[in-house]
Amino acid sequence: MTKTVLLVEDDMGNVRVFSRYLTKLGGLAVTHTEDADEVVKIVKAGQADLVLMDVSLSHSLYQGRAVDGIRLTQLLKSDPSTASVPIILVTAHAMIGDRENSLQQSGADGYISKPVVDYRAFIDQVMALLQKSEK
């Protein structure tokens, strides 16, 4: 059974690049949205095995309020019905300490900084979390 990655990203260039590598190197199906209400609906419905979450969502609203990837991850991780779905934060804001702060704040399972240079390592991290979540 093919695993599905939900790509929550507001930059269509990143969507295309990530989708290409996830499908070609990982053999994964990819769904994309930046609509926070839709993200919650998809994850609650069990239609995503892993979420790649952009931290800086510029146009996302949840229940009418602006929300970033950190807050959206907190919402998903605090809900018992979605808490077990692995979430990897993806961000271009990769300063010293950002990784630890973002992971601690959000409860996410992983962190990748953009631009992604080593796509093999990127896919390996995604696959490792998918395998871990099966157990």
Image: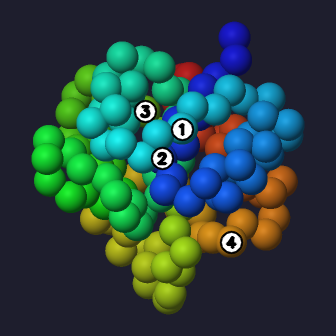
Name which of mark 3 and mark 2 comes first in the sequence.
2
Q: Which residue is mark 2?
A: 8
Name which of mark 4 and mark 3 comes first in the sequence.
3
Tell which tag, 4 or 1, sits nearer the viewer.
1
Q: CA distance from mark 2 to mark 4?
A: 16 Å
Q: Residue furthest top?
A: 1
In percent of width and height, residue 101 lies at: 36, 74
Q: Secondary structure at mark 1?
A: strand
Q: CA distance from mark 4 to mark 1?
A: 19 Å
Work out whether residue 21 or residue 104 is closer to the camera in this orientation and state it: 21
In percent of width and height, residue 38 lies at: 34, 32
Q: What residue lies at 79% left-to-right and 69% top-to-bottom?
A: 117
Q: CA distance from mark 1 to mark 2?
A: 6 Å
For residue 63, say whether it is visible: yes
Q: Which residue is mark 3?
A: 85
Name which of mark 2 and mark 4 comes first in the sequence.
2
Q: Residue furthest bottom?
A: 96
- The image quadrant where one finds the C terminus is top right
Q: What residue lies at 60% left-to-right and 26% top-to-bottom?
A: 4
Type of amino acid under label 3: Val
Q: Secondary structure at mark 2?
A: strand
Q: Secondary structure at mark 4?
A: loop
Type of amino acid under label 1: His
Asked if the residue under mark 2 is in contact with the one under mark 1, i.e. CB atoms within 8 Å, the reply is yes
Structural crowding at the residue carrying mark 2, measured as other residues with C-alpha within 10 Å and reported as few (<14), some (14–19) or many (≥20) = many
Q: Which residue is mark 4?
A: 115
Type of amino acid under label 4: Pro
In percent of width and height, residue 63 lies at: 14, 41
